[in-house]
Image (cartoon, rainbow, N blue to C red):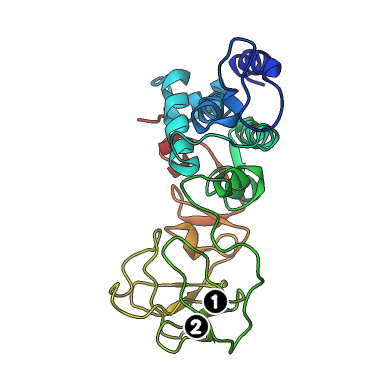
Amino acid sequence: MHTRFIAFLAVLTVTGCGGTKEGPDGRVDPLTTSEGICELWGLAACNEDVVRDCNGSSGTQEECALEQADFCETKLGRHVTGLDRDTAQECLDEVESAYEDSEITYDEFRKVVDLSTGPCRQLVDQGGAGGAGNVGGGLLDGGDDCAPPKPGKADPCVETHYCDADRMYCRPKADPGEICCEIEDGLIGPTCSPDDPEIPCVTSAYCAQDGVCVARGDEGAECSTDRECAVGFLCVTGIGECRDFITLGTGTSLCGNLGSN
């Protein structure tokens, strides 16, 4: 465990558990605010091995920690208070564990990079920048009437379907080889105009730049983005292959949030 991280956590143990609480000196518990959590996030992620592997002889742990703190705040939101202390601690434990060996597995990537699952995702849902999406009420089955989701909200249909904005019902997603239209962040290229109705691909495929769904690749398949890899794999951009883990090193995409030059 990173020694600075241990020292900072020792100070925080006196601030109590749950809610926005004040310590004995009257200050708000850092583990209940996005600023406090994200400062600790930077210290947890940026151990000496990570800094060396991402930066070589350049860069410092302080620069790395600042980069990671900023990344954290883009996810949790800035000036957010009242976050759950226990969830925050669990999230920070996940961050430290993920980066301690300078290797990020697919499961760790989901927990501490794209924050799609785990305690860090729970913090985002409590009031962070990403919002909670659609919560409760259950998902709609194929053929059910639906209302298209607002920006930043989850689709109301089951995973295999999407809410057709023109026909207002849950329609099957496009299979490989079928026409698609997706405009969200992270696409390989623009597949359609924002004015066109969305036609997403099934989870085993991605929408290529020519507007056709293409099956995602398994381990060893060529890729340029994570979207081209099957669930359980990440695109290692340095070698252009789908793998189930990424080893941090100069030039890898994950180092961009770790103060690399």
Camera-side residue of 46 and 42: 42
Amino acid type, mark 1: Val
Q: Is residue 177 above or below residue 75?
A: below
The mark found on residue 202 in the picture is 1
Residue 29 picture quarter: top right
- Quadrant for the N terminus in the image: top right
Point out residue 180 in the picture as x, y percentages from the top left corner: 41, 80
Point out residue 214 in the picture as x, y percentages from the top left corner: 47, 76
Residue 26 picture quarter: top right
Residue occupying image coordinates x 67% and y 71% = 138
Residue occupying image coordinates x 60% and y 47% = 121
Residue placed furthest toward the top: 25
Q: Residues within 10 Å of mark 2 (few under 14, many from 20)?
A: many
In the structure shown, which secondary structural element does the residue marked by tag 2 occupy? Answer: loop
Earlier along the polypeptide chain: callout 2 or callout 1? Answer: 2
Q: Are marks 2 and 1 in contact (CB under 8 Å)?
A: yes
Residue occupying image coordinates x 51% and y 27% = 42
Point out residue 14 in the picture as x, y percentages from the top left corner: 70, 15
Q: Is residue 179 above or below residue 127?
A: below
Reading the image, the residue beneath label 2 is: 174
Camera-side residue of 112 and 86: 86
In the structure shown, which secondary structural element does the residue marked by tag 1 occupy? Answer: loop
- Quadrant for the C terminus in the image: top left
Q: Is residue 100 left or right of residue 167?
A: right
